[in-house]
Amino acid sequence: MNLEALIPEYVRSFQAYLPSRPDHLLQEEYGVPLLHRLNNNENPLGPPPAAARVIAAFAPERAAVYPSGDSYDLRQALGSRFGVSPDRFLVGNGSCEVISSVIKAFCQPGDNIVTADKTFAVYEWVAEFSGIEARLAPLRDYAFDPQAMLDRIDGRTKILFVCNPNNPTGSYWTRQVLVDFLEKVGDNRIVVVDEAYREYVEDPEFPDAIELMERFPNVVAFRTFSKMYALAGLRSGYLAGTDAVVDVVRRTSVVYSVNVQAQQAALAALADDREHIAATRALVREAKTFLRGVCDYLALETVGGEGNYLMIQTPINDMLMYRRLMKRGMMVRSMTGFRYPGWIRVTLREMAVMELFAEALRKEIQAIRLTNKGMK
Amino acid sequence: MTQQASKQQSILTRLPFSMAFLPLAMEFADKGARGFGYGDREAGGLVLAVEELFSFYVRQAAGGSTVAIEMEDQSYRLALSISFRLANPDMRAFNLTWRVNPDSDESLDMLGPMIAARSVSSLRLDFGADERVALRLTRDRDYAPAGAVALPPPAAAAALHLADPSPDDLHHFAAMAVASGSPFLPPFLARPGMAADMLAAGHLDALLLLNGDWIVGGLLWRPLTDSCLELYGPYLFNEDAEDHALRLLLDEAVSRISRSRSRGLVRRQGPLAGHERFFDFLGELRLTGINGAAANATYYYRQLREESGGVVYCAGRLAAFLGEQYDRLCLPRQVRATSSGPTRLRDASALAVELEHPRSLAVIRPLCAGKDMAANLTAHLELLRGEGISNFIVEINTGRSEDVAFATALEETGFVPRLLIPDAGLGDLVIYDHCGPGVQP
């Protein structure tokens, strides 16, 4: 069988993403009894209490029955929550699935998408392995650069992806910046505003993409239950758009992809999030202040805005720093894959873990500086 | 980053594997090379290699078998592969040390592959499944050496910016690198036309640093193995007191490479000030140049993907060396001890040798293991010393049992494991050097 002949060129040249190995194997390989996860921006508080109860009470016999194919009840709840029709939501198996649906719905080979070079990689990946060109605008001062994105638009540009706040830098566009951008883009292209971390933002100037859809019908908002709502293990995210846009995207979406437990837990989480969000924000605030202080003390540069993560510049290459910290039971995200060589991203967690991380970081930095001094 | 290879041209023929078709095979190589625009020297080398290899192996082939010959024009070189099915191919003749004994018919028969190996730029053997053997040859196009060019005047670093070079830009940059007298010029950079053609063919990537209209620096990278890239440079033609230019070039290059299919990036030139920010230090090889001066090679490495672990089976000194290196580099590998070498070995081992005369360096790589491994290594050392070579490196891949089988023989013949390049092949690449004639490691 000539497998090569069957593979489209854009798939042949694409490198599959290899996720981290399971924690138990990593612990064995690095020789650590415990691994603290500071790599995936998970919420250590776990889901809101009502969602936790739904998960705990899940009846095994429910596993034998297909879920609602289009997350009917969850969409009703989202409609009530945001004051728009339930038909303007599409729920997916994590927001990565809805990224794929949107690109498939609007793009064909020869078209392009525009996004930033240093942001969540999945927009670029899905475009590339679908045969769609990804045009990348450099960040400016660690933030999406509206003009650089506008400069990359041409007649074949179908979608612009804005990660707001941006992962991994935490920068964000205010409402005014986003509105100005939307006015310049015009209404012939889709503008996706990925708000995966919006619940962490406390600035009243932070825009609400769902609200902006009334004025700009080409806006599509992405949100997720994986981050603030701590349901990452169940995989559930959604998009919101106008009726017309959602009607098109629905054609390229897979039904029944969101399991019944994820739908139920997300539904419960939505109804019980006020105190959970407040507690999570307080935790992140405290951890961010603490970790910034540690990095200042160690003379390490940091970059961070909103979101439950902080980027730290390392005196050695980030891949080696990742491995050194792994040997101390601390799993961070190396930033080479985000095109930020020499940086790591650290999830902001409860203080007990942050203090352990700070100690591990301090020891590593001290050892590195001693070695470097010795070499000089 | 997706490496975009330009559209290549190739021709393919499949012939009955019998002597009657030798002239057609030679004609294929000759007409193909000339059709792709190569001259007498390049075509002649390939035709000779095809003649010798075809003639040698056709005698061992089973009746009724076929041979496939494919030639690809990669613009800066011709790549030719000869593949066929053959049980127990005799690879002895690929050893540089194979000597013809005029009294032995068998020995005379073996002369052909030796001539073939020496008439091309590179020769590699691949053993596939189902008893398939592929001989892969390349013959570089002949290029003129670099002409004289001016180097940039000293200038403030504030106006520096990066640029993607066109082949013409790279041609000029290569000539500047030669003019700057850099001691670490790869052969393709010493021939600017070759660097430009490699860039156009998608076999080389580069990034230039400009100050106004002047090229003031640059760096290049290309695949070292299927899973590893090699970085050349940065070459800087002006002072870079605060490493500003260095950082600009390396940060951008690593960012571009970071989403490629490669798992690692290696740099094997001289020491790089401030390397810690970009690379892991792997070690240094002490080399002696033709004039007796030291020309050490410093090895740096950077992973491009988060580590995924692995297992290596080996014994003795190699196991101890790997354990130390994995620990120093924080690489999660399990070294599992094996009590003995492979139980089934061919009679004869085979080694490939790559010679770099300007550095008086021989890089030796195992092709296949055999019962005579120590004797074969010793014979290679003697021959190469006789030809004036003073530096010897052996590369073995921990992912290939045929390579790891050489570990004991290497120790017995005075080779010492010096450094390790992670993820540089099927597994990690261990670099041995030799402690000198008569010196015990």
Image (tube, coloured by chain):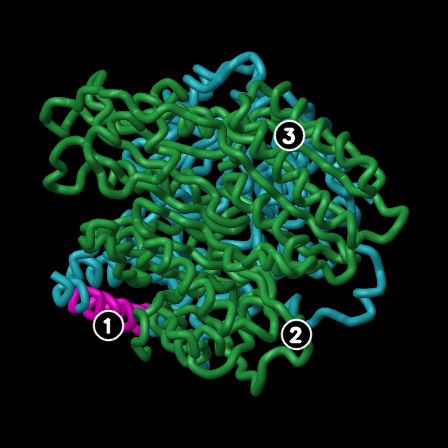
Residue B427: in magenta span: no
Q: Which residue carries the number 2 mark? A: B345
Amino acid found under the numbered disc labelled 2:
Leu
Alpha carbon distance from label 1 to label 2: 49 Å
Report in which chain the residue with disc 2 lies. B
The image quadrant that residue B294 belongs to is bottom left
Where does residue B45 sit, x and y in percent of width and height?
56, 34
Crowding at mark 1 (Cα within 10 Å: few <14, some 14-19, many 20+): some
Amino acid found under the numbered disc labelled 3:
Gly
Residue toward you, B302 or A188: B302
Q: Circle 3 — which element? A: loop
Where does residue A239 sit, x and y in percent of width and height?
61, 38
Q: Which residue carries the number 1 mark? A: A363
A374 sits left or right of B194 in the view: left
Crowding at mark 3 (Cα within 10 Å: few <14, some 14-19, many 20+): some
Q: Which residue carries the number 3 mark? A: A131
Q: Is residue A354 above or below residue B296?
A: below
Q: Do the CB atoms of the residues marked 1 and 3 lie less than 8 Å apart?
A: no
Q: Which chain is green?
A: B
Amino acid found under the numbered disc labelled 1:
Lys
Give the residues drawn in magenta, as a range. Answer: A354-370
